[in-house]
């Protein structure tokens, strides 16, 4: 157990050019994934230090923040002339786990579509849990925080201020959460583009060399116009479309459009032949 250092909470020095929180009152985050991040801090029940941390964040006492794989560093102006150095470390996930995560994301088109639009899918953590991990720190062992201030409490108000501002950054860019866990946005999507990842594509039917036979109609225009056999849908088997957002599968939709197009073409030919 850690105890108070005995130092009274002195009034912080005015900071020039600090990062002021966008939030002026109330919650610091609006998106669910940023709220989950802040909830992890507030679950530590830091009490008054969290309140002072929120004030520090809103007053611009945090001078800078740097986010890199597995680590966040910041400088926070306190009551002493020298700013305090804050370090927040998050356990990074091994490459094999990231490969498993990418495989599961690739298997669900809605995950990829949401991420491409800059959104974090609500149930994204199920993908991490199924891969033996968690996007958000699940235990204190996964989240280590340090500050150079004399306060022995952890988290101190300087760590809390940095943590709240991180929540606002995650609000803006959810992929920063992936960076902390060891993968950038570019690395994740590079994994999704790999040939050996994701569900196998549907078998493709090659086009015939003679394109006039694609529709299966090798007869003359006149005979086609008077054909009494109902038109067939001729849509070839298509590969999976991971970014398709329609209410029904793309090949089903195209098959219906194909049938309507054939019917319309025959009607036009029939009308031309009767003139």
Image (cartoon, rainbow, N blue to C red):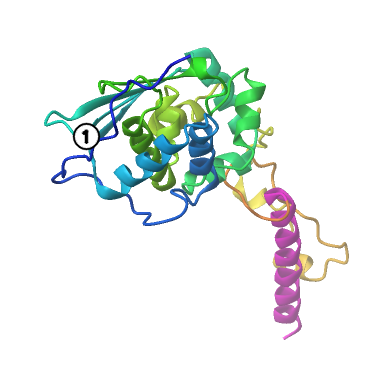
Is 172 located above or below residue 82 in the figure? below
- The answer to if 260 sits in the magenta stretch is yes
Q: Can the viewer see residue 207?
A: no
Q: Position of residue 125 (x, y in %)?
A: 61, 32
- Closer to us: 6 or 179: 6
Q: Can the viewer see residue 219?
A: yes
Q: Position of residue 92 (x, y in %)?
A: 45, 18
State the residue at coordinates (51%, 46%).
Answer: 119
Which image quarter holds the C terminus? bottom right
- Kindly report the secondary structure that dominates the magenta region of the rendered protein: helix
State which quadrant residue 180 falls in. Answer: top left
State which quadrant residue 106 falls in. Answer: top right
The residue tagged 1 is 78
Residue at the far bottom in the pictured view? 275
- Closer to us: 61 or 17: 61
In the picture provided, is 8 more to the left or to the right than 128?
Answer: left
- The answer to if 163 sits in the magenta stretch is no
The magenta segment: 249-275
Q: Position of residue 229 (x, y in %)?
A: 88, 62
State the residue at coordinates (83%, 66%).
Answer: 227
Q: Position of residue 84 (x, y in %)?
A: 22, 27
In the picture provided, is 132 more to the left or to the right than 15?
Answer: right
> Element under label 1?
loop
- Closer to us: 51 or 169: 51
In the picture provided, is 68 more to the left or to the right than 61?
Answer: right
Is 129 located above or below residue 260 in the figure? above
Is 152 located above or below residue 219 in the figure? above
State the residue at coordinates (22%, 40%).
Answer: 11
Is 198 located above or below residue 207 in the figure? above
Q: How many tags in the picture?
A: 1
- Closer to us: 157 or 188: 157
State the residue at coordinates (29%, 31%).
Answer: 8
């Amino acid at each position: 157990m850690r105890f108070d250092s005995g130092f009274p909470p002195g009034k912080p020095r005015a900071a020039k050019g600090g990062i002021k929180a966008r939030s002026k009152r109330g919650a610091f985050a609006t998106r669910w994934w940023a709220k989950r991040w802040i909830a992890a801090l507030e679950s530590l029940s830091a009490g008054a230090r969290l309140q002072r941390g929120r004030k520090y964040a809103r007053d611009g006492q945090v001078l800078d923040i740097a986010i890199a794989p597995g680590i966040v560093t910041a400088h926070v102006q306190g009551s002493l002339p020298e700013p305090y150095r804050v370090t927040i470390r998050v356990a990074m996930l091994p490459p094999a786990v990231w490969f498993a995560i990418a495989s599961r994301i690739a298997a669900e088109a809605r995950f990829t579509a949401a991420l491409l639009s800059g959104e974090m899918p609500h149930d994204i953590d199920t993908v991490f849990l199924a891969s033996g991990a968690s996007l958000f720190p699940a235990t204190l062992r996964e989240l280590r925080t340090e500050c150079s201030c004399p306060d022995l409490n952890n988290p101190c108000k300087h760590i809390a201020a940095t943590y709240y501002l991180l929540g606002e950054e995650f609000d803006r860019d959810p992929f920063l959460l992936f960076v902390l866990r060891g993968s950038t946005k570019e690395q994740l999507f590079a994994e999704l583009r790999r040939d050996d990842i994701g569900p196998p594509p549907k078998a493709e039917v090659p086009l015939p060399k003679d394109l006039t036979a694609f529709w299966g109609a090798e007869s003359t225009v006149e005979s086609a116009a008077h054909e009494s056999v109902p038109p067939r849908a001729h849509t070839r088997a298509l590969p999976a479309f991971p970014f398709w957002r329609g209410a029904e599968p793309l090949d089903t939709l195209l098959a219906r459009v194909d049938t309507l197009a054939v019917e319309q073409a025959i009607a036009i030919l029939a009308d031309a032949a009767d003139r």
